[in-house]
Amino acid sequence: MTELPQHSFTMDESPKGISHQIVQFSHFVRAKGMKVGVQETSHALEIAQLGLIKKPDTFKSALGAVFCHCKEDKALFHKLFDEFWLQQDDGKRKGQMKMHVERITKSANQRTSIMMMGRQKNETESDELKDSQTTSGASLTNRLRRTDLSKMTEVDYELLEELAEKLWKQMNLRLSRRRKTSHKPELLNLRQTIRQNVGNGGEMIYLSFKKKKKRKPRLLVLLDVSGSMDKYSLFLLRFIYALRENFAQLEAFLFSTQMVHITDLVKQKITPKDLKALSIRANAWASGTKIGNCFKDFNENYAPRTLNNNTLVLILSDGLDTGTPEVLNVELKKIAKKARKLIWLNPLKGMQGYEPTARGMQAAMPHVDVFQSAHNLDSLLALEQYLQDV
């Protein structure tokens, strides 16, 4: 958490400084129990861009309209706003808070106008405001989901982490509930049965059934942390954490010029910031890439106890190998032969016109079952369609 300011309401008025402080304030109030998400934060950023941040009272009222969803929220918000933005001694702070209350009480109509960001209060324009806010939130979400991870600003990245956590939880829930269609009478699939008998006047002539999913597969993740993957690696590592619940067992490795086993760390419940500590453990983080040699190390030292025919292998790499392609070909073939399925996610595939012409990718392609991108959040969420069939 950003250290609280030590003076009365000062602000870095550069666009980047304002955005950063707004995001930090959103994190701060959420940590204190308020339900503030991506949409509320995006509206707060819009308020700051209107120039209201230069007027503390007006700014406070406008943010309160966005962040507060009930009466209880309002009292908490006033306290947290002063705590974050106004660091004074107790006497001055009480006086400042009293002034806020008086101004807000005396100018309720004006405050309402400000909270709605200058829009009139008639019903038609209120509807327009709601539509505008919904569209704005949806627009920000869509942009975050589709933006290449290597092009994210610091502020966008913080918002993306929050959005990604929410969407990954939804994906995990869908995967845990999914059942496969079966012709054997195990469990009636009511929805499919109704759909099949729509043309029969409601008579249930054709029945459809479900069966329990097969036992969960094991997941083996090999994450490239070389220099060319530096802008993607940390976020992809968070993605690995999000996948843990869907598999009976997860084994994770980092590689660049050497293979590093990190399964014990993946099993721990650590915060996203703690993931950066892995760079200390992985001495080769952001260095060169010798994929073939790393896979050889894996086959000789780790494969016997981490790889079998019920293992889904997920490789996250751009395939820019500085080693010998023949070694990569031989070692990846060994991995693919033992695995249930081999999926390779390559961030470069998200670039328009990309073809896997690099020597490393050419050597790997004959052994890959699924070759997709991993350049943004949407491309990672698309992995769900391949996980549902394993």
Image (cartoon, grey):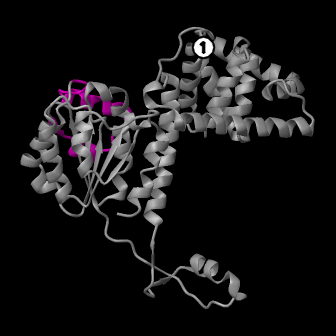
Which residue, given by chain and number where applicable, does mark 1 sit on? 15
Q: Is 147 in front, or is 328? A: 328
Q: Secondary structure at mark 1?
A: helix
Task: Find residue 27 and report its horizontal and vertical position in percent.
Answer: 53, 30
**Residue 12 vertical placement versus 21 (above, below):** above
Left-right relation of 228 to 123: left
Left-right relation of 318 to 47: left
Q: Residues within 10 Å of mark 1 (few under 14, many from 20)?
A: few
**Residue 197 vertical placement versus 27 (above, below):** below
**Residue 216 vertical placement versus 81 (above, below):** below
At label 1, the amino acid type is Pro
Measuring 37% from the left and 50% from the top, which residue is drawn there?
243
Left-right relation of 193 to 287: right
What is the residue that sits farthest to the right in this orientation? 122
Quarter-wise, where is residue 112 in the image? top right
Q: Quadrant of the C terminus?
A: bottom left
Measuring 42% from the left and 27% from the top, which residue is drawn there?
150
Q: Would residue 156 be seen by someone viewing this image from the given angle?
A: yes
Q: Magenta stretch: residue 263 in it? A: yes
Quarter-wise, where is residue 245 in the image? bottom left
The magenta stretch spans which residues?
Answer: 259-287
Q: Would residue 271 be seen by someone viewing this image from the given angle?
A: no
**Residue 146 vertical placement versus 286 (above, below):** below
Q: Is 349 in front, or is 295? A: 349
Measuring 18% from the left and 47% from the top, which residue is drawn there?
332
Q: Magenta stretch: residue 246 in it? A: no
Q: Is 258 in front, or is 17? A: 258
